[in-house]
Image (cartoon, rainbow, N blue to C red):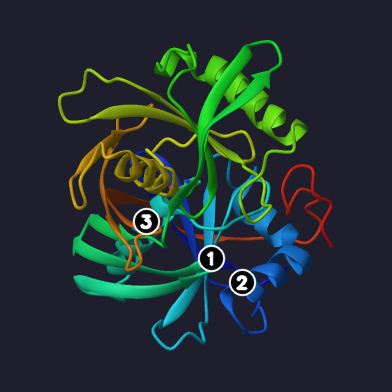
Amino acid sequence: MSEPIRVIDSHTGGEPTRIVISGVPDLGGGSVLEQMQVFNEKFDDLRSAIVNEPRGWDAMVGALLVPSEHPECDYGIIFFNNVGSLWMCGHGTIGLGVTLKYLGQIELGSQKVESPVGVIEFELVDDHTVELTNISSYRYRKDVAIDVPGYGLAQGDIAWGGNWFFLMKDHSQQLEIENIPGLTEYCTAVTAALAGEGIVGEDGKAIDHIELFAETDNPNADSKNFVLCPGLQYDRSPCGTGTSAKVACLLEDGVIAPGEIWRQESIVGSVFEASAVWNEDGSRCIPTVRGTAYITADAQMILQDGDHLRFGIGKSGS
Ligand code: PYC
């Protein structure tokens, strides 16, 4: 039996985060991107053990705190989900702040953290509220037309907010909680159509998050979204990196002014408050995303010898 793995679970607007506190191997140092590559290559069974059934479930997003050599950061973070690592995660960063406060490891104020795609900053505003200042974000292509088999022609914007997003406002889908299976099916078809047509992010990475928008009748929100993540799970929160990609597009279109608040509602009704300002040369924007998280569990995970499902269903492990 391995050493127990201590985790703290939280949810940010309904979307779960499982922060690993102890019991996992050292990834050998270097940049957080290099440590993520080691995690992907050597410890995929551990990733699966932490987030997948029978210990977790498909919507769970895990996170490892790792050492950082970056001069401005005290530590780094690697986020991962049911199928692999994520480049960045906004709801998870909000969960991180609330988790560290719960553990008594931080006080109100700001922290800089190295992610695989750059340095992020978060401010713990109170015990449950965190404001993320994300990596620089931008729209790469506007009004990209695609043919979605079974649904017909559609178009959307490709934008980076720490992950690659295809943002669609004209899609004829009903953004209602009862329609989650239909929305999942549609977004899965969009992801496949993008891959099939060879449409990728500027750096050649897959566009693996689809974000649909609709009007909302919630007086406390400006828009409602549905976000499908890689691993075919929808984000219960409004998605921190997706909201960053959204405000980058809105700033570029002049729909919001620098610093103006955009309130993004999720499919389950939780809301993030976001804004964006231009970076120094005006080529990209720096988004901020504010949300709340609550602790749901403080647990030790056990991987017992002889349990053939100890690394998760579908993982034989070693
Ligand atoms: O909040 O950025 C986010 C996120 C990405 C995947 C799930 N949540």
Closer to us: 296 or 1: 296
Q: Of callouts 3 and 1, which one flags the residue occurring earlier in the amino acid sequence?
A: 3
Please name the residue shown 69% across and 52% down the image. 204
Cβ of mark 1 under 8 Å from ligand 1: the answer is no
Label 3 – label 2 distance at C-alpha? 21 Å
Badges 2 and 1: C-beta atoms under 8 Å apart?
A: yes
Cα separation between marks 3 and 1:
19 Å
Residue on which the image places disc 2: 33
The answer to whether mark 3 is within 8 Å of ligand 1 is no
Residue drawn at 73 percent across, 65 percent down: 43
Mark 2 burial class by Cα count in 10 Å: few <14, some 14-19, many 20+? some
- The amino acid type of the residue labelled 3 equals Gly
Left or right of 71: which side holds 52? right
Query: How many discs mark residues in the rendered view?
Result: 3
> Which quadrant of the figure contains the N terminus?
bottom right
Where in the figure is residue 152, as x and y percent of width and height? 64, 12
Going from the N terminus, do you reach mark 2 or mark 1 first? 2
Q: Which residue is mark 3?
A: 95
The reply to whether the residue tagged 2 has its Cβ within 8 angstroms of ligand 1 is no
Q: Please, what secondary structure does the residue beneath circle 1 have? A: loop
Quadrant location of the C terminus in the rendered image: bottom right
* 20 to the left or right of 98: right
Q: CA distance from mark 2 to mark 1?
A: 7 Å
Looking at numbered disc 2 in the image, what kind of residue is underneath it? Leu
**Looking at the image, which residue is at 50% across and 57% down?**
88
Foreground tag (3 vs 1): 1
The x, y position of residue 58, in whole percent, is 60, 39
Mark 1 is surrounded, within 10 Å at the Cα level, by few (under 14), some (14 to 19) or many (20 or more) other residues, namely: some
Give the labeled residue for mark 1. 117
Relative height, residue 121 to residue 91 (above, below): below
Mark number, residue 128: none
